Image (tube, grey):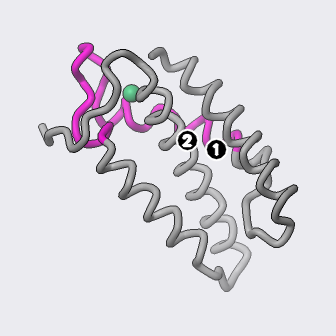
Amino acid sequence: MRAAAHTAISGASAFALISMLRRHHPTARLPDPVFAAVVAAIASGLPDLLEPASSPHHRKFCHSAAFAVIVTTGMRKLYDWMPATPGEAFMRDALLGIGFGYMTHLCADATTPLGLPLLGTIS
Ligand SMILES: [Zn+2]
């Protein structure tokens, strides 16, 4: 999948998902949807930065379902974190946006014929 597609999918999904969650759960401590969309769109290339798409079989550990679990767990820890300063709150929101971008990249890749490896390899 091309980088431009990942950018568009990540930005649009982060905006839509966070907007919907904030509407249905007004007390949820989620980032601003526009901020998260911009950060997610920028961060959407991170998996292919870690494992460059130089061949159709480039998806290893950083593109795996196992890594998705790690990212999701990290995002949950971030969500539960109570920042003490505005700087920490900004960092929390930015990292959540990066997590959204990373996860939407993996979700988009999972829809392709090659899908994602369960564990992948580290190389
Ligand atoms: Zn990828």
Residue at (45% x, 23% y) in the render: 111
77 vs 39, nearest the viewer: 77
x%, y% of residue 33? 78, 48
Residue 46: which quarter of the image? top left
Task: Look at mark 2 in the image and give the residue it sits on.
Answer: 101
The extreme bottom residue here reads 84
Q: Nearer the viewer, mark 1 or mark 2?
A: 2
Instruction: State the extent of the magenta-drawn residues as a range.
Output: 37-64
Whether residue 56 is in magenta: the answer is yes
Ligand 1 neighbours mark 1 (CB distance < 8 Å): no
The amino acid marked with disc number 1 is: Val
x%, y% of residue 91? 61, 65
The amino acid marked with disc number 2 is: Gly
Q: Quadrant of the N terminus?
A: top left
Q: Are marks 1 and 2 in contact (CB under 8 Å)?
A: yes
Task: Look at mark 1 in the image and give the residue it sits on.
Answer: 39
x%, y% of residue 106? 44, 35
Residue at (19% x, 38% y) in the render: 120
Q: Give the label on residue 113, or none.
A: none
Whether residue 88 is in magenta: the answer is no
**Where ligand 1 lies, by image quadrant?**
top left
Secondary structure found at label 1: helix
Q: What's the distance in space between the residues labelled 1 and 2, CA to CA?
A: 7 Å
